[in-house]
Image (cartoon, rainbow, N blue to C red):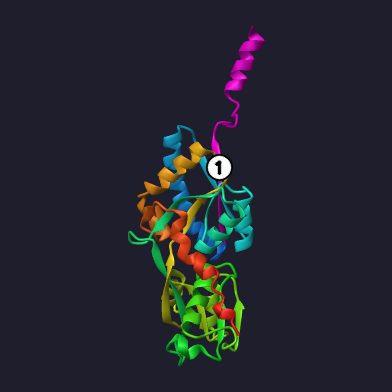
Amino acid sequence: MKKVHSLLIALAFISFPALSDIQLTFGVYTSDKATAMVKQFRPVLNALEAKMTVKLNQPVQIRMQISKDYQQGLSNLVEGRVDFSRFGPSSYILAKKNNPEINILAVESNNGGKTFNGVICVHDDSKIQSAADLAGKSFAFGDENSTIGRYLSQSYLADHNITASTLDSYSYLGRHDKVGAAVGSEQYDAGALKESTFNKLVKKGAPLRAIARFENVTKPWIASSTLEPKIAVSLKESLLELTDPKALTALKKNGFLPGSDSDYEKIRLAMTDNRFFAE
């Protein structure tokens, strides 16, 4: 009896892992510096953890996984290595094509709407005033899978009779901040990046000037095809109900709105627009 009693006392002081905890992985790719992305998303994930813990009556923990590029981030969601992700519109469309079973949980709200701007910028001292002045100039795009950094900016250029053959040269630099830095240091005459990154760089003193803006659809948050339906419902509700000021300030959005695949039809059309490469 003494041995049993001693064993019970010993067990009382042993900390066992909570096997019932729900462990989720949130995936993003590096559209900006990794440190900036952690600062942007961690407060949102903390708020979601708190809401989902109450809804599911189980502790929820969300780990953040930052992929080195768009392609890795896309494949992580498609193949179920992460439970949910935040993508740009074109990455969502590519992922949906590769795995039709992924689903939009919610889309980001920008002042109550589902749109925000991309920017074409030049050095502040440049004589370039509009897209029409870009003939014979060099241009910096973002990632080859980027909605703003490639597809929408190339469609905008084509609308203004600027194509690959009329530019002197062009390159894909990856992240939006790299595009801004390259234009600001006059490595390229012009470049395309998201407006929020442009504004941040200008605020820090980068010598950049916008010559054009074009509309994009806000980013979707997407559930993997392997996410348990009950958890997906809780996550969707928690996103749509999110009002935490700290989290939304970090995200630089006003909240979340219901979203559907049809919201991104405009982007699908831009992705099939090959006029930029016409001879």
Q: Position of residue 106 (x, y in %)?
A: 43, 51
Q: How many marks?
A: 1
**Residue 97 against residue 273 in the figure, above or below:** above
Residue 249 quadrant? bottom left
Q: Position of residue 138 (x, y in %)?
A: 57, 86
Q: Is residue 24 magenta?
A: yes
Classify mark 1: residues with Cα within 10 Å, few (<14), some (14-19) or many (20+).
some
Q: Quadrant of the C terminus?
A: bottom right
Q: Residue furthest right?
A: 3
Please, what secondary structure does the residue beneath circle 1 have?
A: loop
Would residue 206 be seen by someone viewing this image from the given angle?
A: no
Q: Nearer the viewer, residue 4 or 219?
A: 219
Q: Residue furthest left?
A: 112
Q: Nearer the viewer, residue 122 or 184?
A: 122
Q: Is residue 241 magenta?
A: no
Q: Position of residue 207 (x, y in %)?
A: 46, 83
Q: Residue furthest top?
A: 1
Q: Position of residue 182 (x, y in %)?
A: 56, 80
User: Magenta segment range?
Assistant: 1-29
**Residue 144 against residue 110 in the figure, above or below:** below
Residue drawn 36% across and 50% down?
A: 244
Q: Which residue is mark 1?
A: 227
Residue type at mark 1?
A: Leu
Q: Quadrant of the N terminus?
A: top right
Q: Nearer the viewer, residue 73 or 114?
A: 114
- Say whether residue 119 is left or right of residue 245: right
- Say whether residue 66 is left or right of residue 247: right
Residue 271 quadrant? bottom right
Would residue 101 be seen by someone viewing this image from the given angle?
A: yes
